Amino acid sequence: MSRAYEQLRFKKAITRDGVEVGLMLNAGLLVDLPQLDQAGADGIGLFRTEFQFMVSDFMPRLQQQTDLYRKAIMAAGDRPVTFRTLDLGGDKILPYMDPVPEENPAIGWRAIRIGLDRPGLMRYQLRALVAAGAGQHLRVMFPMVTTVQEMVDARALFDLEIERAKKLGHELPAKVEVGVMLETPSLAWQINQVCEVADFVSVGANDLMQFFFAADRDNARVADRYDPLSPAALSILSFIANQCRANNTPVSVCGEIAGRPLEAACLVALGFHTLSMPVTGIGPVKSAMMALDVAALRAVILPNIKVTTRLSSLREMVREFCLDT
Ligand code: PEP
Ligand code: MG
């Protein structure tokens, strides 16, 4: 980390007009945990639990899963850690599971779809999470949810594991929050119902943009053809932020755009006050936040994301705003 960013480590990300922005870390393995303090992150906003499965030669046992989750919670201290349940399939293949050939793996049998079809696997992981959260604050979220019913069903599996732990006399988490990742456009159009069944919403912007623009994020030929600072993308993000606020449901953004200063500034201007990002993003985004006038940027963006606009991207406009202020 550069010296300039290192000096920001103990400072909060507060904008010039007083908006405090939570800057969280994306993590997944033990080696990521020291980065929490090194970068001065406010917690772990996305713990990608499938990484442990991907680097292992066999399915991690219950105790191994529990140990990793517990270490993450302990490393964070009083800062929150949000565990994302297994997001397998798509680009994430396990060496010890038979691959299922699919024409379109990104929109195939993956993530929560596997979890709900194989409830034994999902409950095993939820059991480990409940055990790791004993006496602590436990936050769990489900990936690639496309319908409200999927969230209801996934949450019911989580509740079964809480009941099981209770019956066995195990110590329960002191506080539990169960959230949803908003990664598919369909979920945005059910956001009010989603907010009724989720304690928080985390926008998985990598997948949301991939599906929104129908552009494979892993295909270099198409991945950069769209701009997340286009009026269309900013409109759906603004809609999500507004609806969550109206429902009093905490909302954050994870995914790569949260870790890029210009994009992060726009997200905050749209109303997202918690961003989760790779460790390399924390210093630059914190620095950008401290220079930002949120209300002024909001006044620049909002008129330009109306459906009547002809601009294909607000990037230059936002860049100029950030350079001028
Ligand atoms: C996302 O889709 O934005 C996300 C954070 O999840 P992943 O990149 O692991 O799919
Ligand atoms: Mg995703």
Image: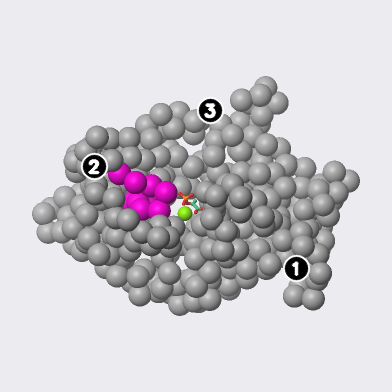
Q: Which mark is drawn over residue 305?
A: 1
User: Residue at the location (68% across, 63% down)?
Assistant: 234
Q: For the view shown, which residue lies furthest in the right direction?
A: 324
Amino acid, disc 2: Tyr
Callout 1 environment at 10 Å: few (<14), some (14 to 19), or many (20+)? many
Percent position of residue 43, x then y: 48, 42
The disc label shown at residue 38, or none: 3
Find the magenta span and give its range: 83-94
The residue at label 2 has a CB less than 8 Å from ligand 1: no
The answer for how far apart the CA atoms under marks 2 and 1 are is 46 Å
Whichever of labels 3 and 1 marks the residue nearer the N terminus, that label is 3
Q: Earlier in the sequence, mark 2 or mark 3?
A: 3
Residue 141 rendering spot, x and y as whole percentages:
39, 57
The location of residue 135, given as percent across then percent down, is 28, 46
Label 2: how many Cα within 10 Å (few below 14, some 14–19, many 20+): few
Q: Which label number is shown at residue 96?
A: 2
